[in-house]
Image: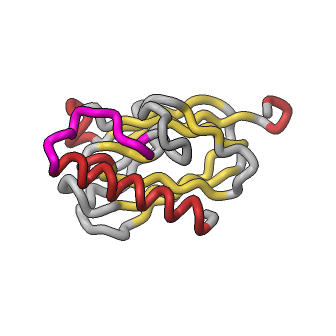
Amino acid sequence: MRDSSRRALLAAAGTASAAALAGCAGALLPGSGGDDPGAPADERIDRTGESTVEVAVGADGGFSYAPAHVRIDAGTTVRWEWTGNGGGHNVYAVDGSFESELVAEAGHTYERAFDAPGTYEYVCTPHQTRGMRGSVEVVSADED
C-alpha cells in the first residue's frame, strides 16, 4: 500500500475513534469511506490498479471496516489489519469461502487473494448486529 494511503487509513481510524469518544459514534465520519473524506461508509471505493489493498479492522469507534466496500481487479490481495479498537474481530465471508481468526490485538493481519470476479460480502461475526460488514467487488481486466 502506498504510504499516503496507509496514513489516510490510519488517520481515518483515529478520527473515528476520537469522534466516538466525543459521543458522535452514529455520525458519518470523515475518512470512513476511504480516501475520499466525504464519502459515506457504504460507498464502494475503487482500488483497481493496485496489487494489494489494505482495510482497517476496528475503525470508526471500533466497529467498522475502513474502507468497508472496495472494488479491485482479479488477482489483487486484500490485507485486513486490526486497529486494536472494539475488542475481538474477525473477517468472515457470508458464503463461508474465507474466515480469519477472532483477534483483538492491534497490528494483526489477514490476507486473501481474490482471483474470481464477483462480489464477496463479509462480516465480523461478534459485531454483525452492530453493522460491522464489508464487501469486495472483484472485476476482470475488461470490466475496468
Q: Name the colour scheme.
A: secondary structure
Which segment is the magenta one? 22-32
Image coords of residue 103 (percent x, y): 27, 60
The magenta stretch spans residue 46: no
Q: Measured along the vertical axis of the image, is residue 10 above or below residue 30?
A: below
Q: Residue at x 37, y 47 (%)?
A: 91
In front of the other: 96 or 77: 77
Q: Residue at x 24, y 54 (%)?
A: 18
Predominant SS of the magenta segment: loop
Q: Residue furthest right?
A: 142
In front of the other: 108 or 34: 34
In front of the other: 43 or 16: 16
Q: Measured along the vertical axis of the image, is residue 119 above or below residue 54?
A: above
Q: Is residue 125 left or right of residue 36?
A: left
Is residue 97 visible in the rendered image? The answer is no
Image coords of residue 82 (percent x, y): 35, 61
Tell me the quarter of the picture where residue 104 sits: bottom left
How many circles with numbers are drawn on the protein?
A: 0
The magenta stretch spans residue 24: yes
Is residue 118 visible in the rendered image? The answer is yes
Image coords of residue 102 (percent x, y): 27, 55
Q: Residue at x 16, y 48 (%)?
A: 22
- Check the picture and name the quadrant holding the N terminus: bottom right
In front of the other: 25 or 109: 25
- Check the picture and name the quadrant holding the C terminus: top right
Image coords of residue 14 (percent x, y): 33, 58
Q: Residue at x 61, y 52 (%)?
A: 113
